[in-house]
């Protein structure tokens, strides 16, 4: 971590050095009336300062290391035909623009700002509206995307790209962005050693955050609200997911957090609130789930039988319709030491751990897993009776699926 | 008419069993809410009470009362009063006093501890549980002259709707697991007043789970404003129809 901070400091120093070149004033009644002219005249290290106005200049390409700065919120408009801003040089800073109306196409994926194989690019404090892809980064290292507001208003799914799309990159930092209305809020594929920090991704059509084949990344303190399918982390190892909030992801295929083929990762301090499924795990190995709060979800966790050696401990499960379900009888995971508000046991020796094990899987959750329409019978008296008798003599639910040391009180998180 | 209603109400409100019922509900509700730190869990416990105890008391108490005031009814019939008026006033007096007991015993604590949409739905469910089962008690009393038989029918009706009906649905769900039965489930659950009350509350309390694919179908049907109106309308029908049948039989009956 310390090493990383030094790298960023270095980068910032580097940028302040290059930013001390000439200033090229751009705008109506200024030295250069168009951005393209200014860019043509600029040299490495110059600042191109763009004043308020609307610029419709087609595809603008930055191919020199410059500080490209907007002042007074200039608007660059792609007229729904062009890729708006293409960064094809390392060490570029793009700051303070409103970038809107990029064209769309599925062959070349035009974006509001697209970075082509360029390292050390900073994109900050921009408003990126109604583009196919918001910010697109490919084959790049050490880029920083900070404080951008990215929104799409399109309704057809095929006409919407991802908010922040990163492909085959390394050491990216994505911080404090707000993304809404895109296909995936943040999309990572083959991106390594990167941080996603304090972003807010909401009401995206598919996933709030979509992770594929991206190892050694972390995402911390993000909020994912009301996305069509929640958050997906797939085919990845060594991901750290800390202190995020996953809320109101509703629907049969919507998950607070979908884990598929993940291993050696940590999920800690997160809040899963009011999702149809808090966490859904499939083919997941050696994951530690700890100090999370699962509150008012339909299903707190759905752990498929293909998961093994996962440890779920010190979590709070409160006010969920079902705490945990699974689809098999094989239990290869550990669930000791959680707090379950449905636990009805006692603690005679006062060690704050219940003396009888807790079986988080209720008979009815098994029935619903087999037969979803049975859900309409939930909370009826016959179902309560069945659940009670199953608790006494487990026959249908996996007996080994239990918390041997359930906590008597919720953990303070 | 109002005078008969007044006498019926005064008579019932003096009744010790009703007082005991109010007290039972009050003790249950207050203790549930003060023991649980989570109001939602309290509501769940009370939901079970509303689905089990309230209909049971309503159906038995009303059936016994209707049989016991047989002589009173005979006396009234000898007066120049329409039979329908007599029956309606007895029904109204009886259900108002039972509702009063429910509102004092359970309604007040719910309003104090869980004043939200789910709480209000629970109160509505309780009100209809009382009304519907009072009407069903009138129906069973009108079916036979024999008090023991009539009480037996009343208890059977309760047992059927409280337990057996859901068991049958569960059985059907498993039998027809391969078919898309979501819509059929909605159709069947309309046939039980207890299920209707339960679904009314369920859609509020377990909204996250109900947003899953199958649940979403139920939610779409019962959860919208029109759906809710429809549910309440059905519950009103469940009150009116058994009572009308009972009244029709009473009008023709040779006393």
Image (cartoon, coloured by chain):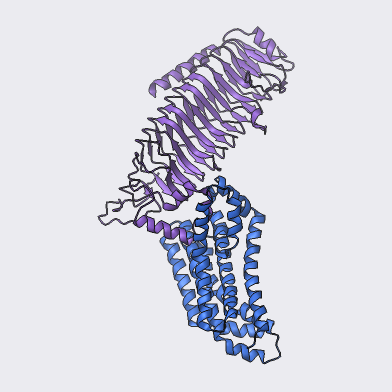
Vertical position of residue A376 compared to residue A285: above or below: below
In the picture, one chain is blue; tell me its letter. Answer: B
- The residue sitting at 62% across, 72% down in the picture is B242
Vertical position of residue B59 compared to residue A276: above or below: below
- The residue sitting at 49% across, 60% down in the picture is B167
Query: Is A254 placed left or right of B239 in the picture?
Result: left
* Residue B116 shows up from this direction: no
User: As drawn, which residue projects farthest toward the left?
Assistant: A349
Vertical position of residue B83 compared to residue B106: above or below: below
The x and y percentages for residue B117 are: 57, 57
Q: In which quarter of the image is residue A56?
A: top right
Query: Is A315 placed left or right of A224 in the picture?
Result: left
The x and y percentages for residue A362 are: 41, 51
The x and y percentages for residue A276 are: 52, 44
The x and y percentages for residue B151 are: 51, 78
- The residue sitting at 37% across, 55% down in the picture is A391
Q: As rendered, which of A193 and B173 lies closer to the eye?
A: B173
- Chain A: its colour in the image is purple
Q: In which quarter of the image is residue A304?
A: top left
């Amino acid at each position: 971590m310390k090493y990383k901070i030094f790298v960023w400091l270095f980068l910032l120093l580097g940028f302040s050095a290059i930013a001390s070149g000439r200033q090229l004033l751009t705008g109506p009644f200024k030295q250069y009336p168009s951005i393209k002219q200014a860019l043509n005249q600029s040299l490495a290290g110059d600042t191109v300062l763009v004043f308020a106005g609307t610029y419709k200049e087609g595809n603008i390409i930055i191919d020199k290391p410059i500080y490209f700065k907007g002042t007074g919120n200039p608007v660059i408009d792609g007229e729904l035909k062009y890729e708006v801003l293409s960064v094809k040089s390392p060490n570029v800073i793009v700051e303070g623009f409103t970038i809107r109306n990029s064209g769309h196409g599925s062959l070349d994926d035009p974006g509001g700002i697209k970075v082509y194989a360029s390292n050390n690019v900073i994109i900050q404090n921009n408003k990126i509206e109604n583009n196919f892809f918001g910010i697109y980064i490919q084959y790049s290292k050490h880029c920083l995307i900070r404080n951008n507001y990215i929104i799409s208003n399109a309704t057809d799914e095929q006409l919407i790209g991802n908010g922040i799309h990163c492909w085959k990159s390394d050491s990216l930092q994505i911080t404090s962005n707000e993304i809404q209305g895109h296909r995936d809020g943040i999309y990572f594929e083959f991106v390594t050693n990167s941080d996603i920090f304090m972003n807010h991704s909401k009401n995206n059509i598919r996933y709030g955050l979509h992770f594929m084949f991206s190892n050694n990344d972390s995402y911390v303190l993000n909020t994912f609200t009301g996305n069509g399918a929640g958050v997906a982390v797939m085919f990845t190892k060594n991901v750290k997911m800390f202190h995020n909030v996953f809320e109101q992801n509703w629907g049969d295929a919507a998950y607070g957090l979908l884990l598929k083929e993940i291993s050696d990762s940590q999920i800690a301090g997160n809040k899963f609130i009011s999702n149809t499924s808090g966490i859904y795990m499939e083919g997941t190995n050696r994951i530690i789930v700890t100090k999370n709060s699962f509150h008012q979800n339909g299903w707190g966790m759905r752990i498929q039988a293909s998961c093994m050696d996962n440890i779920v401990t010190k979590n709070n499960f409160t006010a969920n319709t079902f705490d945990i379900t699974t689809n098999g009888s094989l239990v290869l995971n550990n669930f000791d030491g959680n707090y379950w508000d449905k636990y009805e046991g006692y603690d005679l020796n006062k060690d704050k751990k219940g003396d009888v094990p807790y079986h988080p899987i209720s008979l009815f959750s098994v029935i619903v897993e087999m037969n979803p329409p049975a859900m309409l019978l939930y909370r009826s008296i016959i179902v309560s009776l069945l659940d009670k008798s199953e608790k006494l003599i487990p026959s249908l639910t996996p007996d080994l699926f239990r918390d041997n040391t359930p906590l008597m009180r919720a953990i303070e998180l | 008419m109002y005078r008969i209603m007044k006498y019926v109400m005064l008579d019932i409100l003096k009744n010790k069993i009703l007082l005991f019922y109010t007290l039972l509900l009050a003790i249950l509700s207050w203790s549930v809410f003060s023991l649980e730190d989570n109001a939602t869990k309290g509501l769940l416990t009370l939901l079970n009470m509303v689905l089990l105890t309230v209909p049971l008391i309503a159906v038995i108490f009303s059936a016994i009362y209707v049989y016991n005031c047989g002589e009173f009814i005979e006396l009234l019939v000898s007066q120049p009063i329409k039979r329908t008026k007599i029956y309606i006033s007895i029904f109204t007096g009886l259900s108002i006093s039972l509702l009063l007991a429910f509102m004092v015993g359970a309604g007040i604590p719910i309003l104090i501890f869980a004043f939200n949409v789910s709480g209000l739905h629970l109160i509505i469910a309780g009100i209809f549980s009382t009304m519907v089962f009072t009407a069903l008690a009138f129906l069973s009393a009108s079916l036979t002259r024999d008090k023991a038989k009539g009480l037996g029918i009343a208890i059977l009706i309760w047992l059927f709707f409280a337990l057996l009906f859901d068991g049958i649905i569960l059985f059907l769900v498993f039998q027809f697991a391969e078919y898309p039965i979501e819509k059929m489930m909605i159709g069947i659950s309309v046939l039980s007043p207890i299920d209707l009350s339960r679904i009314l509350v369920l859609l509020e309390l377990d909204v996250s789970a109900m947003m899953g694919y199958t649940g979403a179908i139920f939610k779409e049907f019962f959860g919208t404003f029109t759906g809710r109106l429809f549910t309440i309308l059905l519950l009103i029908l469940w009150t009116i129809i058994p009572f009308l049948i009972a009244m029709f039989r009473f009008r023709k009956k040779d006393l």
